[in-house]
Each structure stands twice: as C-alpha cells, then as structure tokens.
Image: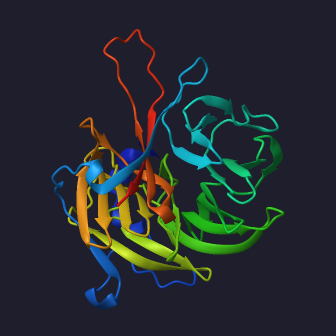
Amino acid sequence: MVYGKKKNYETMLKKKISQKICTYLIISLVMVGCKESPDSGLVTIPIPNSASAPVLLSEMSQEEARIQLETKNGVFLGHIFEVKIHRGKIFISDIKSISIFDLEGNFVQQLGRQGEGPGEYKSVTSMDIDEASGLIYVSAYNKLLIYGPDNMLIEERKLGYPIGYLKILEGSLWVVSEEIGVEFGDEIANQTNIYKLNHDLEISDTIPFKTVILDQIRVGGYGFRYWLSDIKEGLFMFMPVLTPENMIRDTLYQVKDNVVMPAVKFHFERPQSFDKWGVQTLALLNIFNSPSYYILEYDQDYKRFMYLYDKKKKRGYNLRGGLIDDEGDPVFLRPLDLKEDLFYYIKKFEFEDKTIEEKNPVIGIVKLK
C-alpha cells in the first residue's frame, strides 16, 4: 500500500503544484529528467497505457521451490515486505518482526525482540545478509542492529540519520537515507543520499542522489523496497518519489565511481494526474534490474501492474496483477537473487469458513527463462 501524509489539503490543491515541488538537484550530475531529447543517447522503453494479454508464469520461468510456511500460535505473518534465503533458512520481514523458517517451511525462531529497549526494534525498515560473514543487518528507522550467524545480537547503533534501505555490497554496508523537511535556502526539501559505511559504521563515502523541493513538509512511501540492483553490469538504483507532483519519476540510474547517472528511461504513455485527495494516479514504486529483465512495479488508477521487459528479445509485457500461476491467480515477482534471475512470489490463501485461522502464505521461488 502506498501511504502519504497530507497537510492543508485545500490550500495545496489551489496552488500550482508544478511551481515549487519535486525538482531534482543532484550534485556532480547533469540530471536527465522527464524531457530528455531523442538524441540524448539514453535508452528509452515505452510503457503502454493498456494491459497486455495474460501471461503464464510457467511460460516465463521454471519453478525452483514452493514452500508452505508453517502456521502456529504467535507466528502469523502480516504483509510480507522482504524475503531472504541464507544458509538453508528463510528470513521474512513483515515490518513488525523478522521470522525465520527452514526450507521445508517449518518455523525456527524470531530474529531479535520487538520493543523500544536495548537490542529491540519496533518496526523494520530494511534488512540484508552478508553472504560471506553471515552477519544480518536490520534497520529500524535510525537504529541499526547487527546479528551474528547464530542469530544473536552482536551490535546495536543509533545513527544520526534515518535508514530507508540498506544493502551489503562486497562486504561493505551501503545505506539509502531520506531526510524529510530539510531547510534548503528559503525553502524546504526532502534530501536523499547514499552512504557507504566503514567497519566502524561511520560514513566513508557520500553520494548525493536527489533533493526534492517542497512547498511544505510532505512524506510519501511504499513498504516494499528494493532500491539497489547489483548485477554484473554494475550497481543500479531507483527510489520512488510519492509526494504530490505533476510528473513521473521514470528513470533507472547507475551508481558508478561515486556518481549517479541516468541509465534507462521508461516512458509511460499515460500522463500523470491526481485523484480528489491530491494523490498520484500513476505511481511508479520499484524498478528491478536483472541480467535478463527489467521489472517495474507500479499502480495505475488503484490497480497494481507489473511491467516485465525481456532484454534479449526486446519485448515488454504490461501485466495487471502479475504473471498467472498454475491455479489461475496473478502473482507478483520480487527479487531473491538478481544476478541469477531468481525471484519469489507470495501466495496467500482465503477460506470460505471464516472461523478457520488463515494460514501463513506459500513462498514460490522461480528462475526466469
């Protein structure tokens, strides 16, 4: 679900939204925004307004596993936002907690404790696992918790900035941080930076990503985040801007040598507009970049779409709800291991008998062809 915070809505609607909000100001970068010229050299992929015909999951992928997660007292998963598989275990975050299962779907334990005290977290904004060391990194707003391979807490640190997303790259911790309502001259802005942290968890490198100028403090976001795609071709980034703005942030960027540069533009046939509450009717939420595919997750008129682009065939599929599984249901693919074109999907069950407790979902794992 996309969420937002609105203030003085009536006043906001009367203003010309395009005057002051949402302007890219990226240091050390000449930004190519939504008006690139055809001869700019930037690869552009069109996104049609209408949906494609349904496409079967089996046509596009081969199934690797289908895991029914155990349901038991005190272990009921809410809305799942992250899935990681590491050393024979499945780590699942549903914002409030991180649950660990084995590959048969049997519940093993919770990672850490819920709460606001030392060693506890109230909500999870992001998590990642260092495959080499086995260290598990969990962020809870500005709190960073590090767990060892035995799932025991080994370090906790409060940082001086919010952690919106974190990722381990070649043994180093990278953090995407968005600071809300920062003074920017006579105006205010939301500023996003990419930080590389050293072993002492201090900032060793800063890469400015964007500064969005606002007419008042506004925040908008989406729970599932996969902002950094690390593949053989390099490190790529997309982070959505979901505050009200009369444009579409439609460009995937590459991060190289501490500089952010446009890599691919996705041109939506459908223009941006607002509903009666001033919320975008076209919201691009995520862009995943694998060796063989681009996958976009977006909402259009309150309906979820997945745009799947085959790089080899240069063919795109604009899929309402996702690919169709063998039970005739749409499923949405999310990255598990981008370098291997490995993805997962979540399949929930509904019961006609409402007295029966709803089961935990099935996690399907597929490799795109």
Q: Residue furthest top?
A: 355
Evaluate whether residue 65 shows in this view: yes
Query: At 54% across and 32% down in the image, what residue appears?
Result: 105
Locate residue 240, reporting x and y percent. Answer: 45, 59
Q: Which quarter of the figure is the N terminus placed in?
A: top left
Locate residue 19, reporting x and y percent. Answer: 37, 68
Evaluate whether residue 300 shows in this view: no
Q: How many marks?
A: 0
Q: Nearer the viewer, residue 134 or 40?
A: 134
Q: Nearer the viewer, residue 13 or 295?
A: 295
Query: At 42% across and 78% down in the image, what residue appears?
Result: 263
Vertical side of 78 occupied by 2: above or below: below
Q: Which quarter of the figure is the C terminus placed in?
A: bottom left
Locate residue 66, reporting x and y percent. Answer: 44, 39
The way the protein has been coloured in the rendering is: rainbow
Query: At 45% across and 80% down in the image, what residue appears?
Result: 31
Quadrant housing residue 2: top left
Q: Nearer the viewer, residue 76 or 207?
A: 76
Vertical side of 237 occupied by 70: above or below: above
Quadrant housing residue 205: bottom right
Vertical side of 170 occupied by 167: above or below: above
* Side of 356 where 217 appears, left or right: right
* Side of 325 where 185 appears, left or right: right
Locate residue 228, reporting x and y percent. Answer: 53, 64
* Side of 285 where 200 appears, left or right: right
Q: Nearer the viewer, residue 130 or 200?
A: 130
